[in-house]
Structures are given as structure tokens and as C-alpha cells.
Amino acid sequence: MSEKFQAVVIGGGPGGYVCAIRLAQLGLKTACIESRGSLGGTCLNVGCIPSKSLLNLSEEFHNVKNLSKKGIEVGDVRLNLNKMMKNKDKAVTVLTKGVEFLLKKNNVSYFKGIGSFKSKTEIAVKDKENNETIINSEKIIIATGSVPVSLPGIDFDEKTIVSSSGALKLEKVPKKMVVVGGGYIGLEMGSVWSRLGADVHVVEFLDHITPGMDKEISSEFMKILKKQGLNFHMQHKVDKISKNESGAIVSTIDKDGIKKDFECEVVLVSVGRKPNTKGLNLEKIGVRLDNKNRIKTDKNFKTNQDNIYAIGDVIEGPMLAHKAEDEGIAVAENIAGQSGHVNYDTIPGVIYTTPEVASIGKTEEQLIEANIKYKIGKFSFMANSRAKAIDDTEGFVKILADEKTDKVLGAHLIGPHAGELIGEIGIAMEFGASSEDIARTCHAHPTFSEAVKEAALSVDKRAIHS
Ligand SMILES: Cc1cc2nc3c(=O)[nH]c(=O)nc-3n(C[C@H](O)[C@H](O)[C@H](O)COP(=O)(O)OP(=O)(O)OC[C@H]3O[C@@H](n4cnc5c(N)ncnc54)[C@H](O)[C@@H]3O)c2cc1C
């Protein structure tokens, strides 16, 4: 059986399904192929959504347990992990079904199965029963995402040695958990299990967590996480992980060559993700990869083959769902003859711990390296009335603006609702705003967003409340 389309997207993650919907909106006969059996990709199935569900529920558990400190007696608070996991699964199901509905509503044909290139214009889709359908298409967009990587010689069994996917479905709270890697996924999952009662130890090769983040924010972040009970072992290289009857032993060597073993029930290896091009048969059609095995594209997301494009985690750039989505829209518009574009200078990054951490644009370290003169405005949530009112005062807002033009170059936040607050700075940066533009915008009182306004005022040393 062979079917003909104008555009086919391989992968139904946030890059792929958004791209397919936009292509269909623009009038192209479109199909989307997804192998996992449900749409939404890593993000909805084993990433953003289940992790945020558990972050929220574990935070509620932690907060309720501590309510008596604020004068609210709730009695005995107990955890029902099984129910919590079901709640998380329900959120995933509702959202993945929602995407299926959206594809239908937009007349996108959904093929369940593994897609691989038969030729430059033909994709073979193999379903669970090994039935093959051939799809013919003028344009093909690869959006096959990424998969977790482990350390050399260490395999995930998803019970004792787990990737983020395993860490999202543990059946009981481990007494002790080692998180290898101090990136955002490890810290989010470490926070979840720590709040639920695990003794969490983060083992990190570098001397700081969250590489690439503004250093001032990253060290404040680590201080706060330590206060919450997470243990950090910096400049420790994992040598090997061996399993025993009670779990695993993580053997490390620190920067001075001192060996240390960490015994634990569960070890989460969270050292990064790699682009997923497995089984696509790219060699056959000559699609080129870069030196990190990502699909190489030009600024219009076109590969070295004229009718084949790639977006999302499988190409260069931050592995983030909103980056993949924006690329999906841009490539669809380019294919339809419009001028799709992604501004990589204004892609926010958020860590959904408590407090949240959010950043956009350049870090102070990047500005120094690029020899760009800048001004800094900072404002602490300690002096924000809303934060004071609800006793949630950790963190600060930091805005970096060009020394001469005052144009906002970057912003870095740690504090309550930082992930929401970063939105206004994104819009400001898209419009080329100055810090004065933010400072002169009326912000409602009492809100956390007043901390953004005050940080903008502080760029020219005229903050009112500090
Ligand atoms: C624990 C965790 C938490 C995260 N939290 C966040 C967050 O809070 N915010 C954020 O922005 N990002 C987050 N991410 C990252 C985010 O999930 C990814 O950046 C995003 O999903 C990438 O989208 P994508 O469409 O490029 O690829 P994916 O979402 O990986 O989707 C690709 C899809 O293609 C399918 N596929 C692969 N090969 C084939 C084939 N040959 N045929 C058919 N289908 C195929 C796969 O099954 C997959 O469903 C998180 C990731 C993890 C692991």
C-alpha cells in the first residue's frame, strides 16, 4: 500500500506534531509518523509533563507537611506514591490524547509505526505487527528528537540504574539516591525524590551545577538546594557503577585523585541526551550529520538534501520543547513559501525546582568573553512585597543591559514563579526593549513581577525598594 502527501513529518514530539499542524493549516496535505504509540514525544510522555506533575505533587506534599510552621495543623500527612504516579500518568494521557485530537481536527494523517527512508521521497512505516506502509512525499521533515545517554559501559536497567524515564516511575521512594550529573533534569528529579523522603546525593564532574547558566545564579541555586537537603559532591568523576543486592555502588574519583564509593538504592544517570537518528536509514539517502551526530541543517532547517528538513532535539541548539516547537512552525512556513524564523537569542530556559530558575539571552560570562560592555540591575525577592506576604523570598532577578544603548541583553532569575516572569523579558527582548522600557512599564502591585521592574530600575541605580 502506498499513500501520497505533500509533507510528511517523522516524529510526533513537540517539534513534529506542531510542525504537522502548521503545515496542514497552510494547506499542505500532511502526515505525521510516530513510533511510540502515543503523540507528544519525549516532552509529553517521559519529559516535561510527567516531571512537572511530580515536581508539583512532591512540592505539595512537602508544603503540607510543613504547614504547621505557618499555623495550620493538618495532622498526619502520608504519601501514597502509587496514587501520585497515577495522577501523573493521567496528566500524560490527557495531553497525548489531546494532541491526537488536534492532528485529527487539522486533517493531519497519523501513522503509528517506525519510519525509515526508502528513498529521498519515500518513507516506509512499519507498525507493531510488522506491516509496512509506504508513504510518498514531496517534503519530509525529520523530528525524531533525542534519547538519554549513559556513561561508557553503564547500561540503564530502569530499576536500579535509571535514566530520567526510569526516575519518573520508581515504585518506591529510595532510601538513598545518587544523581550523576548536576544538570537541570538531574536536579529536578533529585528534588522530587528528596521531597518524597530520599537522601539525594548529586555527583558532578564540574565545580558548578547547571553548566552554561549565569554563574551567580548557579551558585545561589546550589546554596538553596543544599539548604533543602540535597548533597553535592563536586569535581567527582564517576569511574564505575556496580550493582549489588541492595542497589548499586557508584565509584568516583575526585579532583585530587581520592576515591569514594556511594552506596545507594537507585542511581539516576543524567549526563545528557543524544540526537536520535537510529533506524532512519539516513546513510542511504545521504543526509549529512555534524560532528556530534546531529542532523546538519542550514538556517532554513534544510539538510544537504533539497526536500528533506530537520528540527528539534535532532539538530543543533538547546534541547528544549519550545525551541523544537518554534522550529516546527518556522520550517512549515518556509516550506509553504513564507519566511519562518527562530530568534535563538531569546529562547528561555527554565528549571522547575523550588525556587524556579529561569534565564534568557546572554549570561554575564558570555558578555565578558565577547567583550561587550554591560550594566547590571539586580533585585532581591526579599524586598518584594508579594514574596514577603507569602514568605517566599528566596532568590533575585538580574538584568543585563548594554552599557551604552541600555538594550536588554539577558536576564537571569531565581525565585518564585521565575519561569512565568521570564516571559515578559522575552517579549521585551523580541521588541529590542531597553531596561528603561521595562522600568517604565506599570506592573501590578503586589506581584512578583514588580521584582523584574525593580531590577530594571536598578540597572540605572534607581530601584525604589532596595
Ligand atoms: C525528564 C525530562 C524533562 C524535560 N523537561 C523539559 C522542560 O521542562 N521544558 C522543555 O522545554 N524541555 C524539557 N525537556 C526536553 C524536551 O522533552 C525535548 O527538548 C523535546 O521533547 C524535543 O522535542 P522533539 O520534537 O525534537 O523530540 P521528541 O520529543 O524526542 O520527539 C521525537 C519523537 O519521534 C519519535 N521517533 C523517533 N524515531 C522515529 C522513527 N524512526 N519513526 C517514527 N517516530 C520516531 C520518538 O518516539 C519521539 O516520540 C525534558 C526532557 C526530559 C527527558
Image (cartoon, rainbow, N blue to C red):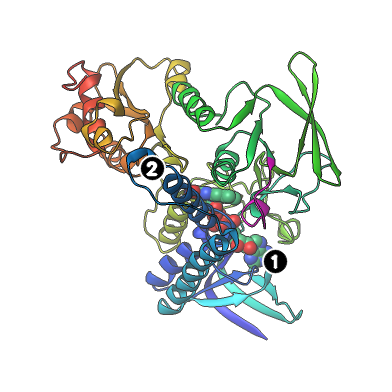
Q: Residue at x 81, y 37 (%)?
A: 249
Residue 28, given in percent of the width and then of the height, sits at: 44, 73
Q: Is mark 2 within 8 Å of ligand 1?
A: no
| Residue 21 is inside the magenta segment | no
Is residue 274 placed above or below 22 in the rendered structure?
above
Which residue ends up furthest to the bottom in the rendered image? 1
Q: Is residue 285 left or right of residue 145?
A: right
Q: Badge 1 is on which residue?
A: 117
Is residue 142 visible from the viewing direction of this image?
Answer: no
| Image quadrant assignment for residue 437 | top left
Residue 133, given in percent of the width and then of the height, sits at: 68, 80
| Image quadrant assignment for residue 145 | bottom right
Q: Nearer the viewer, residue 361 or 49?
A: 49
Dot 1, how many residues are within 10 Å of its Cα: few (below 14), some (14-19), or many (20+)? many
Nearest-to-viewer mark from 2 and 1: 2
* Quadrant, the C terminus: top left
Q: Residue at x 60, y 40 (%)?
A: 186
* Chain part drawn in magenta: 166-176
Q: Is residue 282 left or right of residue 461?
A: right
Residue 209, given in percent of the width and then of the height, sits at: 57, 28
Q: Badge 2 is on which residue?
A: 68
Q: Secondary structure at mark 1?
A: strand
Is residue 419 placed above or below 436 in the rendered structure?
below
Q: Main secondary structure of the magenta part?
A: loop
Q: Residue at x 57, y 43 (%)?
A: 185
Q: Find out whether the residues at labels 2 and 1 contact each other: C-beta distance under 8 Å.
A: no
